[in-house]
Every structure is written in structure tokens, then in C-alpha cells.
Amino acid sequence: MEGASYQRFPRVKIRELKDDYAKFELHDTDASMANALRRVMIAEVPTIAIDLVEIEVNSSVLNDEFIAHRLGLIPLTSQRAMSMRFSRDCDACDGDGQCEFCSVEFHLRAKCISDQTLDVTSNDLYSSDHTVVPVDFTDYAGYESSEQRGIIIVKLRRGQELRLRAIARKGIGKDHAKWSPAATVTFMYEPEIHINEDMMDTLTLEEKQSFVDSSPTRVFDIDPNTQQVVVVDPEAYTYDDEVLKKAEAMGKPGLVEIYAKEDSFIFTIESTGVVKASQLVLNAIEILKQKLDAVRLSEDTVEADDQFGELGAHMRGG
Amino acid sequence: MEHGSFTDNSAATFSLTDEDHTIANAVRFTLNQDPRVTFCGYSIPHPSEARVNIRVQTTGDPAREVLKDACQNLMLMCRHVRSTFDKAIEDFKASNAVKAMKIDSLDSSGDDSEESE
């Protein structure tokens, strides 16, 4: 490379990591990179969701397309999604999604024979592939109920029946939100808070307490030992300027200075359970690399209609 | 798709289909880090059409090469983020495994008190 670019390499530090929740810090990078990661996580990481439903019998109170819509929204564990092919790209079958490389088949049979209402839930969906199943939401820590909960699809009365076959395919959130693996992905700038100690010393304890209370979230607190205002949780700051307005109202502008560090971000990721939160980030980076590869390699094709097109006409002064 | 002059290839507009702000903003940022670039920006001609125009003007190098280098740099950055993230996960799990062993001995006594309530 001739001129070395002023590129820095980002650092990552993980704060919290659970199966479906991750919080981590990303340093030394730009907002465009952080935003690209966020957008890819929401819209372009592939997952598997039910896409085609063949209903044999439906005598429930909901009509066919209603049930099909609900089935599509059920989250399915999608570890296989990154290695699967899209149905339209599959050459092993004729593209209507019946082969094992590009689709997973489900079936559901429910009939209510008792007087009690039967709840048809996602637990009643039987998969042809044991790695792609409806996400299990049983809360093992909860003491309230020990029975298996699933997502209720429809409720049946005595005599009503539901029998269907469903095919799940790989897709991305851009096509339909059912394929989005992320519940929420947010990032915020890391705040840097400086307290002007000299100015703070001129306040009485009451004034300090009212200053601390003026913030909607608990950012500051009064240290009981030294009676000084200290920053207890800088990241609780939501960039509302309440404390700054309070400082001005008290007649002391500049009492506290809060900057957003332009190259430090705190990501909070919640997954729907289809992939682990950590796996979601890794897949997102992988997809971003694939997109960049596509851009890089597509430059080799010289467009024949360079001469035509409106942009070309503008360039030639047309 | 590259729109430019045949005589002067240091300035060109690249029109990418099926792309949006996700990749365009990141590539624009990486291009700005390159000292050979005098101007770089992107626009989306119409929000209903998935198309991005990236304009690159350089100090003499072919704009196409500069764009390719920017994509390469961005990929390196992605690779680096990935390995850093992998390592951070391992470190986190290792440090948590140590904590979990300490909590385990406390958990059993905690459970007893909850059941009695």
C-alpha cells in the first residue's frame, strides 16, 4: 500500500453476557462502523422462519392466513442458518423449498376432544430437523409454574381441529421482520463527566442534594463520608441535559461538563432466542465482510451501459 | 457500476445496487481515512430504490483502486473486531467461571431460605 491510511483498530470489552443478552464496549472506531454493525444485526443476519403453510384441516375460530401469519412469527432456533442456502439459490431442488439443504419441514396436529379449551402452542410443532425447533422459553429460575409454556398459536373448543404442514426457510430481516434475530440492538456514546470541584465546594449540602436529584436517572450521588458529589454511574446518563439546566438555574453554569466520547460506544443487544447474543454479533461481522467482498469483486465487471443512463448523460454535460 | 471519465480516472462515481446506508457510510468513513482521497461522499438517489452512489476523488490514483483498498481496510477492521470479540468472550467466560464456583457454595444456602418463605 502506498500511503498508509490513518486507520485504527477497534477494541472490544464485554460487560455482560447471557444467552439472549449481551452488553459490550467498542472503542477506537467510528459511529458509521457501529451503526453498520447495528443495521446488519437487525436486518441482514439470516435466520430460519416458517414461510410456507399447507393447511389440511382448520375448524378453529381463526382463519387460515391468520394462523399462517402467526406461525411465521414463531422464533425457530437458527444455528444452521449461516450454513444453509436460500431457497431461491438452491440447486438440489426446484426452488420451491422441499429439500433438506434449503428448508425444514414442520407439522402440527391438534384436535380438542375434551370439554376444556385446548391451547395449541409452539410446543405442538414437530420438526423434521432436531436442530431447528421453536425456541424454548421455559424459565428455569421461575418458581411459579413448572409446566412447559409455549407460544399460543390458537385455542380450540371441543370438536375443533387443526392439521397443517409448514416449511421453514432461511431469510433476512430486510425481507420480513419474522426473520430478524434481534429484539433490540442499541448503542450509545460513552459519556465523560467532569465535575468542577471548586464550583461544587461553593454549594451547600441541600443544593448538592437537589442537584443530584435533578437527574432523571441516577448518575450522581453524595458520598456519605466526604459529603462530595461523585459520579456513581456515568452510563445511566441518557444525554438529557437536565443536570446542565439545573446547574444554570442555580446560577452556576459549568458546574459539570459532560462530553460524549466520539469513538467509544456501549452496545446493548437483546436476541429473540433464535441465536445466542454473542453469536449474533459474530454473524453480523461475517455478513458485513461478505457484503464488502461483493462490492470489492463487483468492481471488476465493466458496465456496458456506462455510456447510457442519466448519470452518464450528466457527466457528458447532457 | 462505475461512472467516470475515460481520460481522468482519479475521480468517479460508483453506483452500487441492493445497498443502503449500512455499507455506504462505513465505506465512506474508511475512504476518508485514506490520505489519497480529496473528496468522498455518498448519496441515495431515491429511498424506494436500493441504490447508493459513492463519489470518490483522489490525488491522482485511480478511484477504483482507492475504493478497493478502502473495502479491504474495512474488511481487515471487521476481521480484527471479530477476533477481539472472540477473545473478549473467552476472557469473560473464564472470569465468570471463577465467580460461578464461588457463588455455587452460597446458592444452596440461599435456596433453603427462599423455599421456607
Image (spheres, helix red, strand yellow):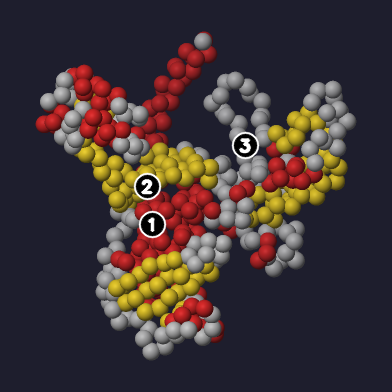
Q: Chain of mark 2?
A: B
Spatial CA distance of label 1 from label 3 is 35 Å
User: For the point 49% across and 18% down, which residue is it?
Assistant: B111
Spatial CA distance of label 1 from label 2 is 22 Å
Q: Nearer the viewer, residue A304 or A311?
A: A311
On whether disc 1 and disc 2 are found on a single subunit, the reply is: no
Camera sees residue A221: no
Q: Position of residue A220 (x, y in %)?
A: 27, 29
Q: Which residue is mark 2?
A: B88
Q: Chain of mark 3?
A: A
Q: Chain of mark 1?
A: A
Q: Residue furthest front?
A: A318
Q: Are marks 2 and 3 in contact (CB under 8 Å)?
A: no
Image quarter where the N terminus of chain A lies is bottom left
User: Label 2's element?
Assistant: helix
Q: Nearer the viewer, residue A89 or A187?
A: A187
Q: Which residue is mark 3?
A: A136
Residue A95's tag is none
User: For the point 73% across and 59% down, which residue is it?
Assistant: A97
User: Label 1's element?
Assistant: helix
Q: In the displayed structure, would residue A311 be above or below residue B70?
A: below
Three-letter amino acid code at the position of disc 2: Ala
